[in-house]
Image (tube, grey):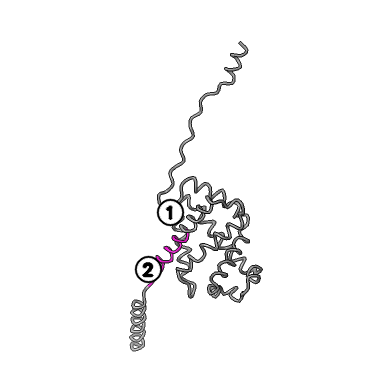
Amino acid sequence: MGCLFSKTKNKEPDLPEPPEPPPPDPRLPLTARQRFNIIKSWKGISRAFEPTGVNMFVKLFENHSELITLFTKFRQLRTRDEQAESLELAEHATMVMNSIDEGIKAMDNVDFFFGLLHQIGASHRKIPGFKKEYFWKIEHPFLEAVRLTLGDRYTDNMDNIYRITIKFLIETVVRGYELAESKEPNDNEKKAINSEEGNSSSKTDKGS
């Protein structure tokens, strides 16, 4: 009897199966598992935004020294040590890492993700001398910086996931740049606008 009582006491009602996670947005190049893995891995990066970002930019300028002229606050930094120790570069690097952080976290809402990164891409239209091709030059420095920060946690699987992710981010930023570019008047339209403004000004002068 005691044995029967024990079994009865320990028996628990069957629990319903947990619901399946919703399928990822088809516009997102990551599976649900990959999405989970990068969010988990990214926590290690988020605790080291500044050193990761500085390593990223130092590597960028090591590979493409001509790009440093685009940055007015630290274009005079020529050596690796100067760049690594620059407060201005560290500040900018942290800001860029925060933007990447926002992008990675926004992938749960792809529409918001596109809007956010399109805005970032469009803002680079205001930088004198900037070309959309420059966005791609950060891809490998980013991967190298993440690898250095994560160390042994940067497995082959995570390398693949980060490669897919940074490519998706850059593609979206470039698209934002292109959309902003397409909305701007071309050279002929600018000439026509200037001509109309000149004619309008001339008529006003004659009228007075």
Residue 175 at what x, y percent from top left? 42, 63
Q: Which amino acid does label 1 sit on?
A: Asp
Query: Which quadrant of the figure contains the C terminus?
Result: bottom left
**In whole angstroms, how far apart are the C-alphas of marks 1 and 2?**
21 Å
Residue 4 at what x, y percent from top left? 59, 13
Identify the secondary structure beneath mark 1: helix
Rendered view: 200 above or below 63: below
Query: Which quadrant of the figure contains the N terminus?
Result: top right
Residue 2 at what x, y percent from top left? 62, 12
- Disc tally is 2
Q: In this view, does 92 lie to the left or right of 202?
A: right
Say which residue appears at 58% left-offset and 17% top-offset.
7
Say which residue appears at 55% left-offset and 67% top-offset.
60
The mark found on residue 182 in the picture is 2
Residue 76 is covered by the magenta coloring: no
Q: Which of marks 1 and 2 is nearer the N terminus?
A: 1
Residue 89 at what x, y percent from top left? 61, 68
The mark found on residue 111 in the picture is 1
- For the residue pair 24 and 184, the one nearer the viewer reads as 24
Q: Quadrant of residue 187?
A: bottom left
**Range of residues picked out in magenta:** 169-184
Rendered view: 114 above or below 86: above
Q: Which amino acid does label 2 sit on?
A: Ser
